[in-house]
Image (cartoon, helix red, strand yellow):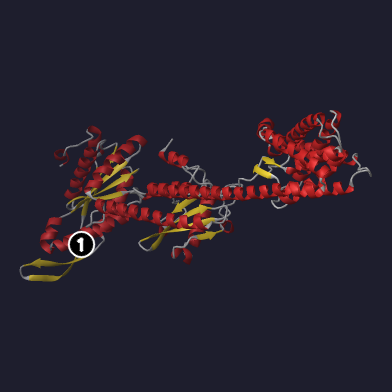
Amino acid sequence: MTGTDQVVGRLGTLRQRNVSSGFKAPGLTFIARLYIVGVCLIALAIWLLSPITSTLDTAGAVIFLVLSGLAQLLSIRFNKNASVSLSMAVALAVILLFGPVYAVWVKIPSGLVHYLKLVRPKRHPYYRSAVTTATLVIAVWAAGWLYIALGGQVGSGFDSVSSMLALVVAGFVYYGINTFLISAAMALEARHGFWELLGKNYKWLTLNMASMTPLALGLALIYRQIGWIGLALFMLPIAMAWYSFRLYANSVEDVRKANEELTRANGRLNCMYEISRTLAGSLHVSETFERILVSIRLSGFQNGFVVGPLSRICIDRPTRRATDPSLPQSAFTYAEVETKRALVEFIASIASDPRLASGELTVVAPAEHRVISSAQRVVPTLVLIPQHVNGELWGIVGIESPNALSDIETKELLLFRSMSQSALEVALDHERAELEAMIDLRTGLYNHRYFQVTLQKELQEATQRNSTLSFMMVDINKFKVLNDTYGHQVGDRVLEVIGRLVRENIREGDIGCRYGGDELCVLLPHADRVRSMEIASRIDRAIRNYTFEARRANGAGIGELEHLHVRVSIGIATFPEAANSPAGLIETADCACYRAKALGGGVAAHDEQLASQNRVPHLRRVK
């Protein structure tokens, strides 16, 4: 695992991207639909087969119907899978007072309140209330008839010992059936393990049994002795206790939310600290680009890219991309030419946006510009973060954002912009300093130190690739006489012009250097003897046709303006046919240069016959 992966893995839990923690159904399977329909049909059949008789206490029936709905409102929910509901106690009390038939009807208001309280406001599927109501009907119907079968009395005598024992068994069956059926529905809907959910829900069975069963007996006794006034007085302290618990629960929830917000803030602070550590210390632009892409991941955005400098954007030379193996697949794969072309054209089209020039975060829709991330998906929204260096727009960091940015994310991206700009400025200044240390200020070519290092590297690469490498030595004829006759300022001017002509007439991949004094040299990768002589002839022709203007400097004063033509001698040696070492290439090209100078200037390559006899011909033998 790389250091980048370790950093990202360590911070993976610190920053989440607005993912809802609520329960969402992934889609009902056929078995889930069949289960829901089956449970609802059973409950409907029980309800239709349970008509209310005329001998029933009408006032009591209405009171407990209303009380069943109110009791559902007084449920105490400990988490999304566990609650203690007074409607269970009301259902058992109705069994004691009126029997199981009316208990079935009492569950209808509970289901209605469940829909109005939990399902409709949160836009959950309506079948959840239907299943909840159906399970309650089935559970209370089975518990009621089991209570009668065990010898329990209805209406009078339910306070006997036998009725109390029957009530305990009926209450256990009621809670057990309801928990079993609800757990099955949840498992089928969420595609979770049934026994795992059943185990979690049954943890609250003891609490319901221990609290709601005695409460049901108390409700029935008070109603039989005092009536609905006693029932209201009995329910009043329970409602006050429920309200007090809700206040306490809300305060606990506020503390929990504050702690979560503090944890998120701490996580964001750690993220910004890691981003600052990631961006700090990079002294090269390419490495800074990679660190910016890692920082995008640390910020919680998986896809992004970096483009710069904008002044050099072209189709054939793509910028850095976020598809390296150590990084996640970016929104911009660059796998196809058209994709790369579309991205580069898109960046070029919006580079002149005044918002970017002013440093603002800019949100765009690249789909309008046909910037395609893959064969199946189009990037919805891009957040463009301008990168200013020395007061000018140098590059752009693009981040794919599926959602609108929050205020906190906007502030963090502004801070990220400042840190990335600082890292780019440091890297650019360092590379500029390195470049200046490698450049000869007089000729504009690389200096001798850079030449020695590059010659070793190019020779090793040519050996590994089994390719050719040519070395060209350029010597200015009669340069000392030129300095003595016209002065050193003219000599410096000649060096500047010849250095520029050499740069203009070599290939893009060739490396021009100042070897020392009036000697220049050029490394030509992938150039054989014939190709290198063509380039040398082009350089010689450009220098020979250039006209210098100078005045003689002597004791009598400054003379008249003269027009001069300077000649150079160019010697060429090619690896591997002429030499196979750096010293051999230099000596062979130097020998060829002396041969050209003996002829008055021009181009000379290594002698093929001498090269075949000895890879490092001696200077005396060439002379």
Give the amino acid at mark 1: Arg
Q: Where residue 229 sits in the image (x, y, percent)?
A: 80, 50
Q: Quadrant of the N terminus?
A: top left
Front residue of 610/3: it is: 3
Q: Is residue 256 in sight in this rendering? A: yes
Q: Where residue 14 sits in the image (x, y, percent)?
A: 49, 44
Judging from the image, what secondary structure is the residue with disc 1 in? helix
62 vs 191, left or right, is right
Front residue of 619/75: it is: 75
605 vs 421, left or right, is left
Q: Where residue 192 sits in the image (x, y, percent)?
A: 67, 35
618 vs 199, left or right, is left
Q: Looking at the image, which residue sits at the far right?
A: 54
Q: Where residue 382 sits in the image (x, y, percent)?
A: 53, 55
Q: Quadrant of the C terminus?
A: top left
> Residue 193 sits in which quadrant?
top right
Residue that label 1 marks: 493
